[in-house]
Each structure stands twice: as C-alpha cells, then as structure tokens.
Amino acid sequence: MKTVLIGVGQAGGKLTTALQSFDRQMGFGAVLDAVAVNTAKADLQSLPVETVLIGQDRVNGHGVGGDNELGAEVMESDQTEVMSALDGRVTAEAESIFVVAGLGGGSGSGGAPVLAKALRRVYDVPVYVLGILPGQDEGAMYQVNAGRSLKTIARESDAVLLVDNDAFRSSGESMSEGYDAINEAIARRVGLLLAAGEATEGVGESVVDTSEVINTLRSGGIAALGYASAEASPDAEDNINTVMSTTRRAVLTGTSLPDASDADSALVIVAGEPDTIPRKGVERARRWVEEETGSLQVRGGDFPLESGRLASLVLLGGVERSERVESFMERAREAIDQAKTETREDPKEMWHNDDLDDLL
Ligand code: GDP
C-alpha cells in the first residue's frame, strides 16, 4: 500500500521517521513521502523529513504542554499550511494517507483528529490514523487526552490502527528509555503491512494485495496488528506447524493491542521465502483466526520476502468491542477526576468536561 505519512506531535514525528527509515532500509518503497507537524520547534529540529511548525502565533514554538484542546484549535487554524506542505506529495500513486500520533499528549492528540477530518474532505484515498495509547502508568491527563482523542479519530478517520505503548515495553524499562525500541517494533510491523500489498511482481494469486488490506479496514473503527516470526525449514511441508504457532503468537501475545481478539474482520499474511510457505499452513492459520476472532471475514495470503524466517502478520479490523478497548476507555473515564485535581492550578481549567467529550 503506497502511502504518505504525516506525523503530528513528538511521538508522531519520531514514529514517522522510524517508519520511513525501515521502509527505505528494506527497499520496499511503500512510503512515498513523510511530513512532521508540531507546535514545538525543538521536537521538529532533529527530524530528517519535511517539517511544519504550527501555532506560532499562539505558543511561539514552545508546544501546547499537553493541552489537546489547544492542540486541536491550533491545527484548525493552521491546517492550510499543513495541507500546502502535502501538495505534490500525495501523488496519484498514493493509496492511503497515515496520520501518526501519540494520543496522550497535546499536539498529536488534538491535532490528529482535526487533520484526519480535513484530509478526508480533500483526498479520495482512505485516511488512517496510527495512534499510540499511553502506558498504564502514565498520568491521568494522558489517559483522558487519549480517551477523548481516540473517540474522535475513530469517527473522523477511515480506521485507527491502535498501538498500546505497554504492548512493546520490556520489563524494568522506563517509558522513555523504551521509546526507540517501541518505535522500531511498530515500524517493522506497520512497514511490513504496507509493503505486503506491494509484492506483485510475477507472483501467484495467493499473494496479498493492497485491496485486501483496505477491505479488512473497511468496517472502520479500531484496528490492531499482530506479529510473530520463527526460523523456517527449507521444505514448506515442514513449516505447517510453524505457521500455525507464529499466527497464534501474533494474535495472542504479539499484538499491538493486547487482548483484542474479538474482531469484525481479519487478514492473515505469511511472509517468507515463497518455497518455504506452506499453503496448507496458511489456510489452517486463516481458519484458526476465524474461530479466534469470531469473524467470517478473514482473508489470508502470502508476502514473498527473502528471509530465512517465516513471519505471521495479522491485521484485525473492528476491535472496538474487545475487552482491551473497553477497559482503556474505562481507565480514561476514571482518570477524569484525577486529571482535574492534577491540573487545578492551571488557569485555563481545561478539565471542565464531566465525561469523555468529543474533541470536535
Ligand atoms: P505531543 O508532542 O504534544 O503530541 O505529545 P507526545 O507526542 O509526546 O505524546 C505523549 C504520548 O506519546 C505519551 O503517551 C507518550 O508515552 C507517548 N510517546 C512520546 N514519545 C513517544 C515515542 O517516541 N514513541 C512512542 N511509542 N510513544 C511516545
């Protein structure tokens, strides 16, 4: 799936850069271009992509300090600048646009829904959001911000591919120590998903194409992505169990959103050397995902790749009813009172909402 990435906020900019460099390093060419947008000048300075500083008249390049309402307002008033930076970058080749943002902060949390809405009005291709949920031990304000942002982007985008920061964190590691590793893990998974539909040269009909990714996300709402890999045996027949076990691990322990296996639709992609991919294994894995997700819309296919390993990549669409999403929304609601206390000294008194109101 050829795509253009737009990172909003600090996490959005860093993850966008990680995604672009993974795509280049692998020589996939699925990422056509990348742009980073922020209200904080310092966070844009080190990024090797086109950057757009917004809200200079309001915050003078200093960021919105976790105020996602301000993040949304600033994006609203400066969206023309962002749109002009995209001119000529979203070419006819582009099959989607990804807005990338951490949902717990200010610029990305508030800016991403506004931008997604504006992009959908202008472009015909699907506009997806790659959104990052705060870890459980991040403060109440992060949880509330993410709850409000998530609710709004689920409505304003074609689908939200959700990543829980806790899903990729190594034990004992602080959140910030782990960011680079988390970003690399996300970049590998999402990078492979984007590239999977691009492998169309001289291949059989079992190879996945971009329309299957788009169709899996068609129901909208929230999506999750699972991944696991293992050593491949040279003979495909010997890899049936390997494909089954990597697929189970991808869904049960290797997902971007833990415990989210109730889904409306799914796509099972088995990546590896074509001669080592067992047809029977892919079909069996697809049927297992059907049972596990309770969905009858489970697609399956291959992604030919030069590698001594086999990987299962499982995209789950429509996971918003899953336990994980519900418990996160509950956590965000519970955090409202706490966030009000934490920000009592704030003259803006931004926590006047008595429930998780939409941002827009
Ligand atoms: P913004 O610049 O105001 O949009 O705020 P941030 O992008 O810093 O968003 C804060 C949220 O993003 C928090 O939940 C952080 O844990 C998370 N975050 C910040 N930087 C990164 C990063 O590089 N990677 C990941 N995965 N999460 C990040």
Image: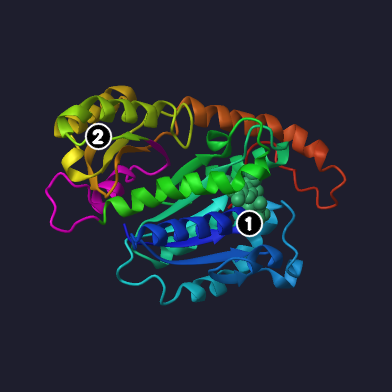
Up the image or down, 293 lies above or below 35; here it is above
Query: Label 2 sits on what residue type?
Result: Gln
Q: Where is residue 356 shown, x and y percent of the image?
A: 63, 38
Q: In the image shown, does 64 or 354 lie closer to the viewer?
A: 64
Left or right: 38, with 152 as reference point: right
Q: Which residue is mark 1?
A: 10
- What secondary structure is found at the residue carrying circle 2? loop
Q: In the image shown, does 232 or 157 lie closer to the viewer?
A: 232
Image point (82%, 36%), residue name: 341
- What secondary structure is found at the residue carrying circle 1? helix
Q: Is residue 209 magenta?
A: yes
Query: Label 1 sits on what residue type?
Result: Gln
Left or right: 122, with 171 as reference point: left
Label for residue 25? Answer: none
Q: Which residue is mark 2?
A: 297
Image point (22%, 38%), residue name: 300
Q: Quadrant of residue 139?
A: top right
Q: Where is residue 262 shown, x and y percent of the image?
A: 38, 27
Q: In the image shown, does 188 or 125 lie closer to the viewer?
A: 188
Q: Quadrant of the N terminus?
A: bottom left
Callout 1: few (<14), some (14-19), or many (20+) C-alpha neighbours within 10 Å?
many
Ligand 1 within 8 Å of the CB at mark 2: no
Up the image or down, 156 lies above or below 36; here it is above
Left or right: 244, with 151 as reference point: left
Which mark sits nearer the N-terminus, 1 or 2? 1
Callout 2: few (<14), some (14-19), or many (20+) C-alpha neighbours within 10 Å?
some
Ligand 1 within 8 Å of the CB at mark 1: yes
Q: Is residue 75 magenta?
A: no
Q: Where is residue 312 shown, x and y percent of the image?
A: 32, 36
Residue numbers of the magenta segment:
199-228
Q: In the image shown, does 22 or 346 lie closer to the viewer?
A: 22
